[in-house]
Amino acid sequence: MIRANGVNAPVSKSNSESRIPAIGRFFSAENRYLPPLLITLILVVGQAKFGLLESFSRTALAIATSMILDLVLARLVIGSAFLNMVLYSRRAAEQRAVAPLDNQSGG
């Protein structure tokens, strides 16, 4: 939402964005999940048809392990960034609260 004249106004998408069908948005360059999905699909189909990899169970285990590790690492990175943001905003609020008191005692 965008705040305009003290009123919250919903953000509207442009006409070109709203006309793009869901399948077009899925295969767009902005979809960050598309490349890993396609690579996984290629590996699974290649293993099923041609036995490219060692075994299906080891392939599934490798894919599941990488997905879990990715989730854990993302949580650690995002969690620490969120914690730093909270600590910074708390410190800034404390400094703003102390600053007016310093000005009053000087006079």
Image: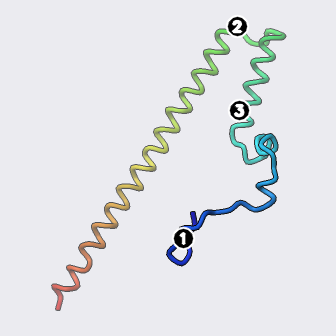
> What number is the disc on residue 36?
3
Going 75% across and 28% down the picture, which residue do you hit?
39
Location of the C terminus by quadrant is: bottom left
Q: Quadrant of residue 12?
A: bottom right
Number of the front mark, 1 or 2: 1
Instruction: Tell me which amino acid carries mark 3.
Output: Pro
Give me the C-alpha separation between circle 3 and circle 2.
20 Å
First in sequence, mark 3 or 2: give its number. Answer: 3
Instruction: Tell me which amino acid carries mark 1.
Output: Arg
Going 64% across and 11% down the picture, which residue do you hit?
58
Depth check: 68 or 23 in front?
23
Figure coloring: rainbow
Give me the C-alpha separation between circle 1 and circle 3.
37 Å
Going 79% across and 11% down the picture, which residue do you hit?
48
Label 3 near label 1: C-beta < 8 Å? no
Asked if 105 appears above or below 45 in the picture, the reply is below
First in sequence, mark 1 or 2: give its number. Answer: 1
Mark 2 = which residue?
55
Q: Position of residue 53 (x, y in %)?
A: 74, 12
> What number is the disc on residue 39?
none
Asked if 89 appears above or below 82 in the picture, the reply is below
Q: Position of residue 89 (x, y in %)?
A: 37, 61
Going 77% across and 13% down the picture, which residue do you hit?
47
